[in-house]
Image (spheres, rainbow, N blue to C red):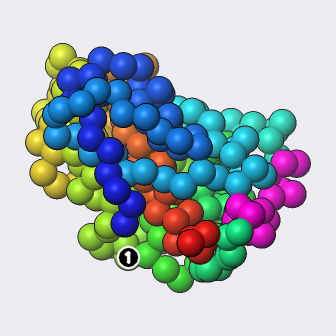
Amino acid sequence: MAEPIELDCQAAIAVPFWLLQWQRLLIRVRAFQDGGNCKMSRVPGYSEALAPFIQPRLMALGPGQPMAEWRNRLERLTVHDLPRPGQSLLDQNAAQCCLAGLWLLYDFLDECHRICQRIATTEGSYWHAIMHRREPDEQNSKYWWRRVGSHAIFPELARRAALLAAGVSSLPAQATWLRTGCRWDPFAFVDLCAAVRDTGSPVEMLCRQIQLVEWQLLFDLCYTRAVASED
């Protein structure tokens, strides 16, 4: 695994969400402050072809509206565009997961579904579960969460969700579990998203922010498995 970056927890809450979460997705990430005990994983720079797709989009909790201006670019992107010079494609399934995630980021749920339903891996099931959560088809999403089981990104997702939830002054009882940071419950998050979707509430915005963090963590994992190191 890559070496973590130390960040100050209080600073993490104070800076704008998109800056905090997405600076690490661009080619090099700097530490905001010394001290504290928050950790963020350092991610290799993306290929020149892939980097423009990594945008700070707060996706809707529902299906959203496909961004038509991105369709042609997404259609032209292939798994062979993922490695940088000096890298090679290491895992086809993980690479396909990256493509599924990008279609999802721009609200093309059908295209995401067509890809991830062919991927018989835990990460393929994860993208499948997110897609159905947004569709929304809660029961189908929960079926795929059962296929996922306990996932490697859950501990970090729980920790970051707690940081974000700490910035919301009042949470309904259904959302207070987010503040613990101890365990990620994808089933409870499906139900919470269903409850606050299209309400325009602070909790809906919180869930959208958490959903973006989830996308980022899962995409990072798939990307680092998809391409071989330059070393």
The residue under label 1 is which amino acid type?
Arg
Location of residue 151 in the rendering, given as x and y in whole percent from the top left corner: 32, 68
Location of residue 184 in the rendering, given as x and y in whole percent from the top left corner: 23, 54
Q: Give the magenta-colored segment's residue range.
A: 72-85
* Picture layout, residue 16 above or below residue 129: above
Q: Is residue 116 visible?
A: no
Residue sitting nearer the eye, 54 or 102: 54
Identify which residue is drawn at 36% across, 33% down: 31
Q: Residue at the bottom extreme?
A: 120
Q: How crowded is the residue under tag 1: few (<14 C-alpha within 10 Å), some, or many (20+)?
A: some
Identify which residue is drawn at 18% across, 32% down: 35
Location of residue 203 in the rendering, given as x and y in whole percent from the top left corner: 31, 26
SS type, badge 1:
helix
Q: Is residue 148 visible?
A: yes
Assign the N terminus to one quadrant of the image.
bottom left
Identify which residue is drawn at 47% across, 26% down: 19
